[in-house]
Structures are given as structure tokens and as C-alpha cells.
Image: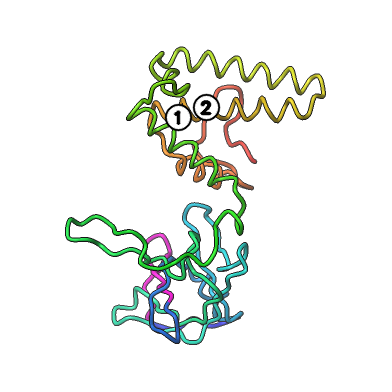
Amino acid sequence: MAKLPGGLKFDKRGLIVAIAQDAKTGHVLMTAYMTREALRKTLETGFTHYYSRSRRRIWKKGEESGHLQRVQQIRLDCDGDAVLLQVEQHKAACHLGYRSCFFRRVRGDLKPSAPVMGRLFRPEAVYGPSSQVLDSVYQTILDRKKKPPPGSYVASLLQQGEEKILKKIMEEASEVLLSAKGGRRQEMVYEVVDLWFHTLVLLGTHRIPLDRLWREFAGRVGKRKAGYKKSGGNAGKRH
């Protein structure tokens, strides 16, 4: 087992800031967090391992994309509360497709600029389109709420109020159950999409960001949710 260097200061959550830097160019690629175990795995394997606060687990950089980071050198800052990882980056560090996560400048009005570097890959081609599609649909719903265009179904639904949206959700849920009971697989796919869509509209009325759903899902995977309560005996539900 790899021995950790002395003088490290992990915060009360057991985390330390980790900065990945291109060993050749010196460009900062990304920032993340490490636990003691993540740093130990990095030392043992020679590839960066970080800790995901949303998924609550250690992950190897590039485990999904193949865009690995081979460690060349690890440095500590003067206070011992951050580590600098000089790495050989395969293709790109940013999950949005850019070489570095720092692909925008701050303008004079303190707003981020357009990307100052080109994309090296399309995220949906590497990670799959699922979450990106839902995020795109949800953003469209928010746009329709803010500036309702004439003839928009979403705008019309929002204008009719939450009771109408709830009624549509109940209708679509019933359609899902009927198609499933009848064994009509393609129809079930169609009805589930309708159900999800109208549920996104409901979330949009309350301006609940999808990131909160992703974090909730991640927290339930393989774990019992401490303090999670729901009528019907689902407390401590394991997914």
C-alpha cells in the first residue's frame, strides 16, 4: 500500500483540493478533490483518481471516456491543503469536450466569454446522449416559461397552471401502466417519454434544477438513504 506524504491537510470532509496540470505545456487542465484513498490509488497506479462529491465515490479519470491522466509528478503547496498533479493528458480533460476545463475568459463585465479553444470531441459521442438530451429539454422548458412563443405547447401548458400539468402527469402515468400491462413495448417507450416530459415541465414550474435529481440518484445507488422518508414504507430505500 502506497504511503502518503506527510504534511497533508485534508478538510473536515476528508478532502483535499487537486489541480491537474499538463506536464508539457503547464496549462491547468482541471480541479477536483481527493480523499486519502484516492491519492493512495493515484500513487499506486500512476493514474489520477479523484473523489466525486455528487456520486460519493472514488473515480478514475477517463474510466468512461478513456481520456486518462498519467501522473508524471505530484507537488504539494506550502500550506499542505492542495496537491498539484503534473500529468500526461490523453485527448481532453473537460467532460464538455475541451482540452482544459478553463476554456473561457472573464470579460470586463465579469461575464464569461465564448470558448477560447476548440472542442476535441462531442460529449454525447463519448458519454451518450441521455443526460444531455434531458438537460436540453429542461432548458427549453425554462426558456418557454420566460419567453412564451405563440403556438408553443409547453407555453400553453404552463399558462394553464400546475393543476393542468399534474392532470397530464396522471394521464401519462396511466398510459404507461396500460401499455406495460398489455406487453406493448414500443408503446411503453413512447408513453414513458411523455411521462418524463410532463414531469420535467412540473420541475420547471418549481425551478428545480436537474442537478439535484442527479445528486439524489447518485446518493441512492447501493446505499441506504439516511433520513430519507417517504410514505409507503420506502424509508432507507436501496436502489
Q: Residues within 10 Å of mark 2 (few under 14, many from 20)?
A: some
Residue at left offset 42%, top offset 30%: 204
Q: Position of residue 223 (x, y in %)?
A: 60, 46
The location of residue 31, given as percent across then percent down, is: 40, 68
Magenta span dominant secondary structure: loop
Query: What residue do we see at 53% from left, 40% from top?
Result: 134
Instruction: Identify the colour scheme used.
Output: rainbow
The quadrant the C terminus occupies is top right
Single out the residue that lies furthest toward the front.
150
In the rendered view of the protein, which quadrant contains the N terminus? bottom right
Disc number for residue 199: 2
Q: CA distance from mark 2 to mark 1?
A: 6 Å
Q: Which mark is residue 135?
A: none
Rendered location of residue 121, percent (x, y): 54, 63
| Dot 1 alpha-carbon crowd within 10 angstroms: few under 14, some 14 to 19, many 20 or more | some
Q: Is residue 158 magenta?
A: no
- Which residue is disc 1 drawn over? 203
On screen, residue 231 versus residue 158, left or right, reads right
User: Magenta part of the protein: which range?
Assistant: 7-20
What amino acid is at disc 1?
A: Leu
